[in-house]
Image (spheres, helix red, strand yellow):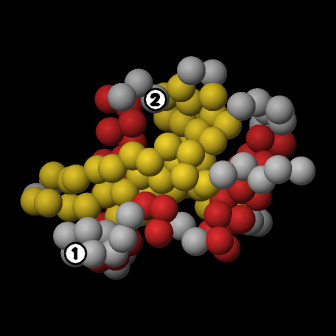
Amino acid sequence: MSVRAMLGLAGEQAAARYLKRHGYRIVDRRWSCRFGEIDLIVEKDDQVIFVEVKTRTGGGSFGGGAAAVGFRKSARLRAAAFSYLQANGLVGCPFRIDVVTVEPVGFGRFRISHLPAVVEEEED
């Protein structure tokens, strides 16, 4: 496994721990379909939340979580979210797409920022 892959996996694990500590229930990890992969799927307050985890080094010079998810990535996340909802009989269920940014700050320590509803649901 490459260093980049190991960093990404560590970031996803840190994000999952953070979300659990804040009352979210982990439903699935690295769920994939033809539209792409969703890093974490969690639930809280009867809402399904699809989480894109961005793990980066460099002291925040990479921009915020919203900057890390451009138009194409947003469209893929929305399509994958709808695919998940359909595959699991949850069409019509309230949901949102969040971004969690993870930055290593020491051995086994991370700075985490949770940005709820960063990707907007498209209007019909």
Percent position (x, y) of residue 121?
Answer: 72, 49
Residue 9, by quadrant, is bottom left
* Image disc number at residue 12: none
In this rendering, position of residue 3 left or right of residue 25: left
> Please, which residue is most extreme toward the left here?
106
Q: Residue furthest top?
A: 45
State which tag comes first along the sequence, 2 or 1: 2
Residue 13 visible in the snapshot: no
Q: Is residue 58 left or right of residue 46?
A: left
Is residue 38 visible to the viewer in this orientation of the structure? Answer: yes
Residue that badge 1 annotates: 58
Q: Hey, what amino acid is under mark 2?
A: Tyr
**Does dot 2 land on a helix, a strand or a loop?**
loop
Q: Position of residue 7 (x, y in %)?
A: 30, 67
Front residue of this view, candidates 66 and 50: 66
User: 7 or 71, which is in the foreground?
Assistant: 71
Label 1 Cα crowd, 10 Å radius (few <14 / some 14-19 / many 20+): few
Q: Report x, y in % for residue 96.
A: 63, 42
In the image, residue 60 sits, relative to residue 13, either above or below, namely below
Residue 16: x percent and y percent?
A: 39, 42
Residue drawn where x is 15% and y is 53% of the image: 108
Depth check: give the residue in front, 66 or 89. 66
